[in-house]
Amino acid sequence: MDILSQLGLPEPLVQVLMGIAAYTIVMTIIFLVHKYLLGRRVLEWMWYLMGPFSWLMVLRDATRTKKKSVAQLAKYGVTEIGQVVLDYGCGTGSYAISASHVVGDTGKVYAADINPFALYMVRLKARLKGLKNVETILTDKYTGLPEDSVDVVFMSDAFHDFRDKEGIIREMHRVLRPGGHLSISEDLDRKIPKAIAQIEKTNLFSLSHRESKLCIFNKSE
């Protein structure tokens, strides 16, 4: 702090910088413990810096009423009691929570994301609502789910952020049952053609329907 003061910086700014430094050190220590002592190797450092601010996503989720969410889920193909669905790139889980009501107690919702803090919120929401059919998966690709175990995979405004898109597509193909489908929506229309090209070039899925920012793919046998 003395060094910062000697630079002639205002005291309030010095305190802010010290706070940022302390926060970074604490979150880095937590990250190292989780990653190397607990073996959670999917974790990335940036999520430990930015992850705690995932609560800001709740503001976005507040615009998704249950009615709107259920209507969007119907477009994804989540419509029946007993379905097993995977919300890949679930964020704080607004769709996953709504999907749990749609599929009922005999169904199952897997909420997968790379952000551990977002998944904490999903679990908190599920616990507060008494939902027993929601399970979170921390992952950057592999889900650990059995082959041919999921009826519908949906990705809401997430596909463009994935690093290993082909690897994730292959994992979605692996977990989807014969006749299952993959639904992808993006926030901008211009992102959809690129997503379609990236998915179809694997020959694992074929486009069956497109509606503006939404496209649905059937699993190839």
Image: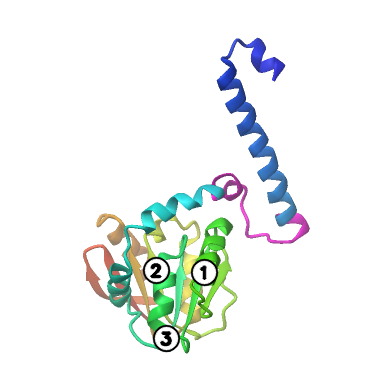
Residue at numbered disc 3: 83
Pair 1/3: label in front: 1
Residue 201 visible from this viewpoint? no
Q: Residue at x 42, y 86 (%)?
A: 83
Mark 2 and mark 3: Cα distance apart in space: 15 Å
According to the picture, the residue beneath numbered tag 2 turns out to be 95
Q: Which residue is mark 1?
A: 128
Which disc number belongs to residue 116? none
Quadrant of the rendering where the N terminus is positioned: top right
Q: Work out whether 74 lies above or below 94.
A: below
Magenta highlight range:
35-51
Residue shown at the point (37%, 59%) measured from the top left: 157
Is 71 placed above or below 219 here? Answer: above
Residue 200 x/y as whole percent:
35, 70
Element under disc 2: helix
> Secondary structure under badge 3?
loop
Q: Nearer the viewer, residue 145 or 21?
A: 21
- The amino acid at mark 1 is Leu
The vertical placement of 52 against 105, above or below, is above
98 sits left or right of 55 in the view: left
Tell me the distance, in whole angstroms, between the alpha carbons under discs 1 and 3: 23 Å
Q: Residue at 25% x, 57% y: name it.
A: 189
The crowding category of the residue bearing disc 3, from other C-alpha atoms within 10 Å (few below 14, some 14 to 19, many at least 20), is many
- Residue 77 percent across, percent down from the top left: 32, 79
Q: How far across and how far down the image is residue 39, in percent?
A: 73, 61
Question: Percent position (x, y) of residue 78?
Answer: 35, 79
Question: Dot 1: within a 10 Å radius of its alpha carbon, few (fewer than 14), some, or many (20 or more) residues?
Answer: few
Amino acid type at circle 3 is Gln
The amino acid sitting under disc 2 is Tyr
Observer-nearest residue: 163 or 184?
184
| In the image, residue 172 lies in the stretch drawn in magenta | no
- Residue 130 visible in rendering: yes
